[in-house]
Amino acid sequence: MSLRVLITNLFVAHGSGSEAVVELLADGLRRAGHQPMLYAPTLGDQAVRMRRRGHVVVDRIAELPFRPDVLHLQHTPPAAMALAAFPGVPAVFACHSALFEVEAPRPHPQIRRWIAVDDLCRDRCLSRGVPADRLSVILNAVDMERFRPRLPLPARPARALLLTKTAEHLELVRGVCGELAIDLDELGPATGRVTDRLEDELPKYDLVFATARMALEAATVGCAVVVGDGRGFAGLLTGARLEEWRRLNFGAGLLSRPLTAEGLRAAIAAYDPADAARIAARLREAATAEAYAAMHVELYRAAMTEPPCPAAEVAAATAAWLENLLPTAAERPWRAVAQEVVGFRPDPVRQALDALQGGFSATLEATLSARLPAMASAAVAEASSHLLAGPLQGSLAATVDGALAARLPPMLRASVEESLSSGLPAALRAAIDQSTAQALQSLPGMRAERMLRGIWRRAVPAVVRRPLNRWRRALLRRIGSA
């Protein structure tokens, strides 16, 4: 029997991460004769491409053309919407990250089966109370029609590709490749060069630096793969390591060592064309999209065979999800989920304070004051961008104290308090004044007012704010009359 499967995801926009997974799953289901439908609140170029290929992709539940037979849930906000829209439809929930709250599994009587994409996600599901007998690990797969085998590798690597979302390790990889006379190209958001056709790029390279899904795809093509990024380093993927590393999705669970030039040189020195070819052959047999889709269909059918739960129980569980996911009490998970949805942007004031880890001595006040322009301008930029950022817990003084408590001896902690109560307020006022004046050149009055209010509340402690309130009110009056 053909199934109508509703797949949820936060995004179907750029084709990376879980977006690539849902596209692969939708393709596999359709090839097997089923009807996949994708629902994501945020759509982009990927959704346009999928629609052109005949897929149903919507950003509103009401636009779905059919009632689904089963729900494949990913990411809790769109999952909650699907559960609320289809209270009688059995569901399967897939966890794609052991870190982010937006991926966290939550109990619900409609969810009959659970999927983890690797062993770390499996452990997270178990820690959240998912029954072990209802939890399956389905490892990531590759569309073998898209990612075709490359020609045999040369005896030594001549061309390398760095695939990365972050920039922390760019210079290190560049330096080592330069030493070894390996031509390096870079691809990914951190490099300013992106593509939606990675399958066309990979066959050009002998060696690929990557993690997670990108590492899997590169190895499937036949490239030698070094697993590591700014988070840490695993080394060269070998046949002996393949099963273990694949069960950890070539990701965070492997990155236990710091990435160093010495480690990169050792990994490149272990380059083995014959071993890379054997790895590719094994993956091309074990990691197919067809097998991947079939494993999901088996779980869908198992979920559909179970009797429905009482409507009152389903409604209560959905309400519990909404209590956690809609803006309510500050300590509930919605705040972390909101930060993750908007973007993983660190709090700028916290970031500036973290930069002050050392150097506190007799020049403490000067060191702090030198950082204030960066702190103020970062807060201005944050407020004007309308992005959510994590709230500071307490005043600026408390934040400095908490961030440095583990590193400062008692005498220096007294110096911190003295600096915050003497010269620092004036310097902070001057820094905010300068940054605000610059920002006002390009911002309309009302937006500037909101920006200033945000900076005032988040960056300035109450003990400083009170004596400066008259200055703030005067400035806002000038903005309003401009």
Image (cartoon, helix red, strand yellow):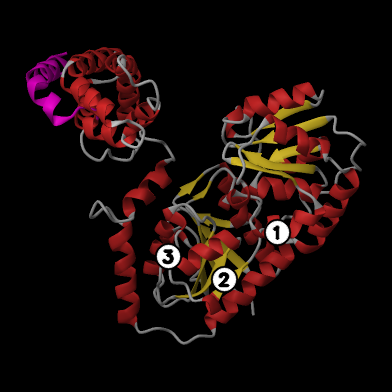
Q: CA distance from mark 2 to mark 1?
A: 34 Å
2 vs 1, front mark: 1
Residue 82, label in figure: 3
First-in-chain label (1 vs 3):
3
What amino acid type is highlighted by mark number 3? Ala
Circle 2 Cα neighbour tier, 10 Å, few/some/many (<14 / 14–19 / ≥20): some
Residue, disc 1: 244
Q: Nearer the viewer, residue 205 or 405?
A: 405
Q: Earlier in the sequence, mark 2 or mark 3?
A: 2
CA gap between label 1 and label 3 equals 35 Å
Q: Which residues are magenta?
A: 459-482
Residue at 33% of width from left, 35% of height from top?
403
Q: Which mark is residue 4?
A: 2
Q: Is 242 situated above or below 202?
A: below
Where in the figure is residue 75, as x and y percent of width and height?
46, 57
Q: Residue 160, position in %: x, y?
A: 77, 32
Q: Is residue 379 above or below residue 233?
A: above
Helix, strand or loop: magenta stretch = helix
Dividing the picture into quarters, in which one does residue 247 lie?
bottom right
Mark 1: which amino acid?
Glu
Residue at image coords 18%, 19%: 425
